[in-house]
Image: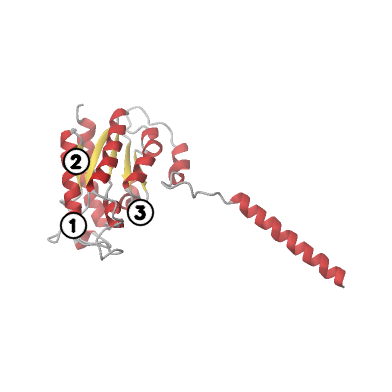
């Protein structure tokens, strides 16, 4: 009887080891992937080169862009608009992703929406200058690769619901937007103004267009789609 129990114990133990070994083989370690390059890698690899005359546009940003495709997938169903938003990302992460998620996809234009998460973190190391340096690097990479640049005036935000202790959010967004506009004008980049059609009297988002004061609802995205189309058309028809 003792021998029988011993055999059963050995069987269960060996089965547990096999399961653990199988799990360790299957689970890949992405702890080194700070910019989450893995998120769109397979999708990018399966993407064919753009057809002749195709007006491919990459939307590079964070949750505002990622949630857009979830709220209104029809807008991205034409195949020429590629959503490469990743929730929570800050501007240096967008810069790291720029080659894989923009340049290698050979778009005609890129829409860069950056800065809000940098400011929302309130780590004490972020300024307009640090955000702008990353935006400038992305814009210069795009221009070098003959990709039209569209820079966004960030959506209005009065406060971040997850960090209500952070004061002066609206003023920070306004200040960053002013610097983005100034840089875009100096370099003849197209400005995509998400601020003006969405702003309320407090310099936050109009309640009718947002879910939480930061992220748009479907109605908000519909407004964004209109001004986005105008900016894309302007960028693709602008002479160098």
Mark 1: few/some/many CA within 10 Å (<14, 14-19, 20+): some
Q: Which residue is mark 2?
A: 191
Image position, residue 68 (x, y; %): 32, 51
Residue at x-position 17% and y-position 42%: 181
The span from disc 2 to disc 1 (Cα, nearest Å) is: 19 Å
Dot 2 or dot 1, earlier in sequence: 1
What element does badge 3 sit on? Answer: loop
Dot 1 or dot 3, earlier in sequence: 3
Decide if residue 99 is on the left or right side of residue 204. Answer: right
Instruction: From this view, report whether residue 134 is shown above or below residue 159.
Output: above
Q: Which residue is mark 3?
A: 88
Q: Residue furthest front?
A: 124
Residue at x-position 24% and y-position 52%: 222
Residues under numbered marks 2 and 3 in contact, where contact means CB atoms less than 8 Å apart: no
Decide if residue 94 is on the left or right side of residue 164. Answer: right
Q: Residue furthest left?
A: 201
**Labelled disc at residue 170:** 1
Mark 3: few/some/many CA within 10 Å (<14, 14-19, 20+): some
The span from disc 1 to disc 3 (Cα, nearest Å) is: 19 Å
User: Foreground mark, 2 or 1?
Assistant: 1
Decide if residue 191 is on the left or right side of residue 86. Answer: left
């Amino acid at each position: 009887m003792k021998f029988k129990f011993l055999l059963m114990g050995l069987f269960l133990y060996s089965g547990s080891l096999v399961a653990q070994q199988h799990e360790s083989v299957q689970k890949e370690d992405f702890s080194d992937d700070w910019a989450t390059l893995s998120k769109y890698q397979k999708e990018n690899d399966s993407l064919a080169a753009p057809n002749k005359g195709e007006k491919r546009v990459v939307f590079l940003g964070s949750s505002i862009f990622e949630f857009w495709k979830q709220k209104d997938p029809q807008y991205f169903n034409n195949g020429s608009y590629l959503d490469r938003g990743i929730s929570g990302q800050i501007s240096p992460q967008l810069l790291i992703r720029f080659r894989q998620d923009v340049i290698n996809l050979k778009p005609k234009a890129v829409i860069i929406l950056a800065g809000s998460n940098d400011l929302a973190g309130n780590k004490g190391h972020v300024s307009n200058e640090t955000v702008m340096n990353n935006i400038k690097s992305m814009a210069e990479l795009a221009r070098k690769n003959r990709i039209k640049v569209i820079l966004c005036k960030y959506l209005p935000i009065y406060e971040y619901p997850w960090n209500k202790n952070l004061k002066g959010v609206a003023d920070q967004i306004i200040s960053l937007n002013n610097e983005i506009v100034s840089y875009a004008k100096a370099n003849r980049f197209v400005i995509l103004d998400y601020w003006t059609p969405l702003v309320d009297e407090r310099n936050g988002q109009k309640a009718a267009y947002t879910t939480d004061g930061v992220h748009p609802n479907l109605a908000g995205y519909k407004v964004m789609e209109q001004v986005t189309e105008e900016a894309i058309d302007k960028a693709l028809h602008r002479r160098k």
